[in-house]
Image (cartoon, rainbow, N blue to C red):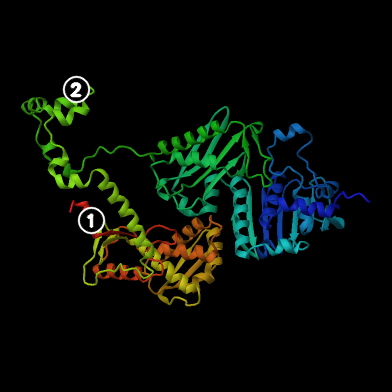
Amino acid sequence: MSDSIQLLPDNIANQIAAGEVIQRPSSAVKELLENAVDAGATEIQLIVADAGKSLIQVIDNGSGMSETDARMSFERHATSKINNIDDLFRIRTMGFRGEALASIAAVAQVELKSRRAEEETGTYIEIENSQVKKQEPVAFPVGTSIAMKNVFFNVPARRNFLKSNAVEMRHIVDEFTRVAMAFPEISFSLTANGQEIYHLESGSLKQRIVHLLGSNYTAKLVNVQEMTDYLNVYGFAGKPDIAKKTRGDQYFFVNNRFIRSAYLNHAVMSAYQQMIPADSFPMYVLFIDLDPAQIDINVHPTKQEIKFEDEKIIYAFVQAAVKHALAQFSIMPTLNFDLDPGIQQLDAVARPFTEEKKEHAAASALYNTFTQKNQAHLIESKSGLKHWKDFFPEAGKAATGQDAVAGKLEYEQEGAAIGRTAGTGHSLQLLENADLLQIHAAYIAASTNQGFILIHQQAAHERILYERYVTAAKGKPIATQRSLFPLTIPLTTPDAVLLQDLLPDLHVLGYEIELFGKDTFVIQGTPADVDQGNEKVAIEQMLEQFKHFNSDVKFSKREKLIRSLAWQHAVKPGRYLAQKEMKALAEELFACDQPNITASGNPTYIAFKNDYLERMFGR
């Protein structure tokens, strides 16, 4: 029998290796941009076509390569940055593994042009499927241009797994943003399908953040800077009032390399504790500089996860740096000693506490039991105070012992049962002529044939809108109300790319939105049942909510959009409703297929039965 084990051909081995390094067009963008940075470039251009599927080209004015280096750069394990094992622990460059260009050449058609300053002519190399097709001298300015064409042309199965152009373009913009953010001293540009999306001049980190993430951050950034012998932490954190429902604008860089770290994110979140809502996320762009020997950056194919030698120290430094920055700029909460004018009129303030009143109070048994050490348990027996149950003997009896526990359990069980079956023929019905009561501008109390229910107005409206949008998505489009004065809405580039991808689905759901120049859209119409006048904010918040849902991969794009719109358009707590509005809300809720919960599983109402109410009052 012949031997079974054999070495893979180089082109197949390269394709296998490419599977880890080049997962999609944006992966190649990251590697090429990092190589341009390492080459010492001061100007870097990224050009893409067809969301990177047809073309990804990076042009830089860096050091360039010799003819030999240009040819060697496409070999596996070829690198100019590592000579011995110790170099692995002193890495300060971006690309270092020697697999990027070999992986790119294995899955695309590549054209390289490069020239060094000391040479009169440059080198042109054409590679396809890891094979060099052409190599010749070429006239070219100092620097390098690498064009990657027809990604995965030789791996059709991989190409079929690529997403829509809008999705792939979002990933490209993300990678571009991360590299450009880390090096504000370098000029960057991004051109897609002949249109320049970004043109970033060299400048300060704050200028780069505003250019990339939006001008709304201009006056909302707090400077973070803590320098120590062990490490430096610097960058910017957003003020609490601009915290969002998504973590999109959160960036960590270690030695100028973008990383993901739930551990360090927790350090920042803890610095914002009690300053922002629990379900909100602060914006931050933070850089950590430390000795490369203290980290291991080669633990993940994309190098976005690293290991710290002592992560607890890093955590403490990051938390302290952000806390100090927020406190320094008077962002931290402080006690407000300005008294409300109404307080000044109270007896406790207006009438002085005389010596006579003081002696009378000090002589009371209640005062003595409070002031005697370790006597708190004797307050009730010595002070002459009656037990609260003595004032309400029947209620006290009903609220103690097994009756109270049984009542609570029955309430929980019966209330849940009503919620589960109300939409499927259960006997629970709203009383037709009974008025409804709004409580705290957030809840609606409605009488039923069995007691009453307490409706959460936002949750109920979410369920109503969710089912309405689901029906529309299945083939019954929602009517559009044309705007008399169309609104123009400018967006950041990532949000513009996202909105453009959502336009077909939004049209089915009643929105008529058109692209109007670069990163700008015109809202021509909205769903007929949506209040007019707040369209711009609604679209912006819908995008944020969509990104929030986007972290859950089990939902389709349309499902995420429907949930986002239902949340956005639902009536929020704090809005007072007229009787007519409350009745319409309650009736529409119980006309839903599943009225008891929202799409995310939260209850829309709680039911209270008559017999339970009577037991609560000892009847």
Q: Secondary structure at mark 2?
A: loop
Q: Label 1 crowding class (10 Å Cα cut-off): few <14, some 14-19, many 20+?
A: some
The answer to whether 529 appears left or right of 362 in the picture is right
Q: Is residue 319 visible?
A: yes
> Picture coordinates of residue 567 (x, y %)?
42, 61
Residue 31 is marked as none
Q: Amino acid at mark 1?
A: Leu
Disc 2 versus disc 1: nearer the observer: 1
Measuring from the top left, give residue 546's x and y in whole percent: 49, 60
Q: Is residue 173 left or right of residue 341?
A: right
Please indicate, yes or no, whether residue 138 appears anywhere in the rendered image. no
Name the residue tied to disc 1.
613
Structural distance between the alpha carbons of marks 2 and 1: 42 Å
Q: Is residue 306 above or below residue 613?
A: above
> Is 173 situated above or below 78?
below
- Against 265, is 561 above or below? below
> Few, some or many C-alpha atoms within 10 Å of disc 2 (few <14, some 14-19, many ≥20)?
few
What percent of the width, then of the height, locates residue 587? 31, 70
Q: Which residue is mark 2?
A: 372
Q: Earlier in the sequence, mark 2 or mark 1?
A: 2
